[in-house]
Image (cartoon, helix red, strand yellow):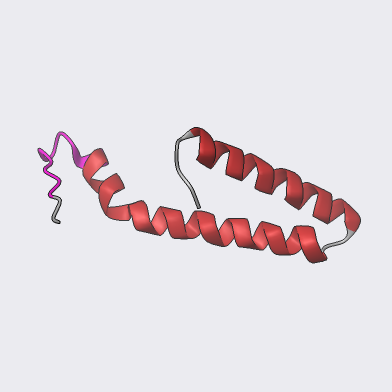
Amino acid sequence: MKATLTFTLPEEADEHRAALEGVRWRSLAQRLDEALRQTAKHGGQKDADRAAWARAMLRDAVSAEGLDL
């Protein structure tokens, strides 16, 4: 199966850039999620609580957009 995305440039330059950078954004979100998981697991109590909260916020936002990590 093949998929082709077509953009009218320069009018759709933002959409074009988003399509090109999507994988990098996902990778960044995954690395952030993992860093927060590690801090929640191994950090001091205050840091662990904050990391768990931030991780939950990240996952809720991702889920609200219909995405997954």
x, y percent for residue 31 = 55, 62
Q: Residue at x 65, y 62 (%)?
A: 35
Nearer to the camera, 42 or 1 = 1
Looking at the rendered image, the quarter that the N terminus falls into is: bottom left
Q: Is residue 17 above or below residue 39?
A: above
Q: Residue furthest front?
A: 1
Q: Residue at x 59, y 44 (%)?
A: 59
Q: Residue at x 15, y 34 (%)?
A: 11
- 9 with respect to 61 (left or right): left
Q: How many numbered marks are there?
A: 0
Q: What range is drawn magenta here?
A: 4-14
Q: Residue at x 82, y 55 (%)?
A: 47
Q: Residue furthest right?
A: 45
Dominant SS type (magenta): loop
x, y percent for residue 15 = 25, 40
Q: Is residue 9 magenta?
A: yes
- 69 with respect to 32 (left or right): left
- 4 with respect to 67 (left or right): left
- 11 with respect to 38 (left or right): left
x, y percent for residue 50 = 78, 48
Which quadrant of the structure image shows residue 33?
bottom right
Q: Is residue 52 above or below residue 35?
A: above
Q: Is residue 67 magenta?
A: no
